[in-house]
Amino acid sequence: LHDALPISVEKPLGITFGAKRGGEGGVVATFVAPGSNAAAAGMKSGDQILYHSSFFGEELWPGDNVGFTKTAINACPNEVDFIVLRGKDVGTVNVKRLPKREAPKKFGKKLTAAQKSRATHICLDCGFIYALKVPFEEQDSSYVCPQCLSGKSRFSGYDPETGKTIGGTGLPLAVSLSLGIGLVAGIGLIAVGLN
């Protein structure tokens, strides 16, 4: 895509996002804090976000909506990948027509050796990998995910070698409840229909 630039940024990013002006929509970096991780990675104010990491980082999603872009970036557990346009190329691509694409091969839930040794749980709602120095079991029941504020009960065991959850449904609570209610209602309708 034109002169698109791939940029990977460690969290915290140090970027303020805003809507790109014009009919095609899109997202731009309205401000990149000097000395921030984004500035160190090469992001500049005015860059148009063509793609950004998905919730879990397995693919890149088009940067066509500011709110959705912020949500996905906040949920991404580690380094965030971007594909950006800069300068005269900004606005030359209609991001609403871009398909999802595979994330760069180097991307994934990269943890340092120390983090890997402590990574025992993952937030089922946003993908935050718990690798803090205090063991997860020692956190009291009021502990919440630092990314999405879900309660401790929304964490499942995590295998840092495979990147997969251990136990848990993997579904957000609202989805699990909706499925359960739907199942009970469906069984009830079948029972009533048989009488």
Image (cartoon, grey):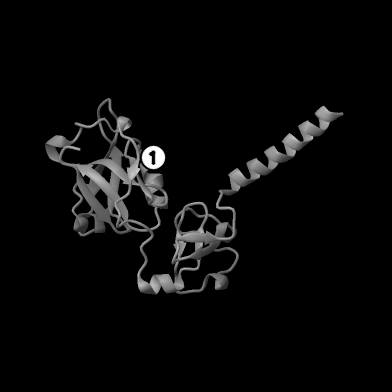
Which residue is identified by label 1? 67
Residue at 20% from the left image edge and 50% from the top image edge: 43
* Residue 119 pos. (x, y %): 46, 68
Disc 1 packing (10 Å; few <14; some 14–19; many ≥20): few
Residue farthest to the right, as pictured: 195
Determine whether, in the image, residue 174 is placed left or right of residue 122.
right
Please, is residue 53 above or below residue 188 in the view?
below
| Residue 18 spot, x, y in % from top left | 29, 39
The C terminus appears in which quarter of the rendering?
top right
Between 103 and 129, the one nearer to me in the picture: 103
Q: Is residue 70 above or below residue 187?
A: below
Instruction: Determine the residue located farthest toward the left in the rendered image.
Output: 88
Say which residue appears at 19% left-offset and 31% top-offset: 92
- Which corner quadrant of the image does residue 167 belong to? bottom right
- Using the rendered image of the protein, determine whether residue 141 is visible from the camera's viewpoint: yes
Q: Quadrant of residue 138?
A: bottom right
In the rendered image, which quarter is residue 23 located in? top left
Q: Is residue 34 visible?
A: no
Q: Secondary structure at mark 1?
A: helix
Front one among 132 and 92? 92
Q: Position of residue 90 (x, y in %)?
A: 18, 36
Q: Amino acid at mark 1?
A: Gly
Q: Nearer the viewer, residue 11 or 79?
A: 79
Does residue 145 appear left or right of residue 106 in this picture? right
Q: Looking at the picture, tell me which residue is in the foreground, 100 or 7.
A: 100
- Establish if 166 lies above or below 32: below
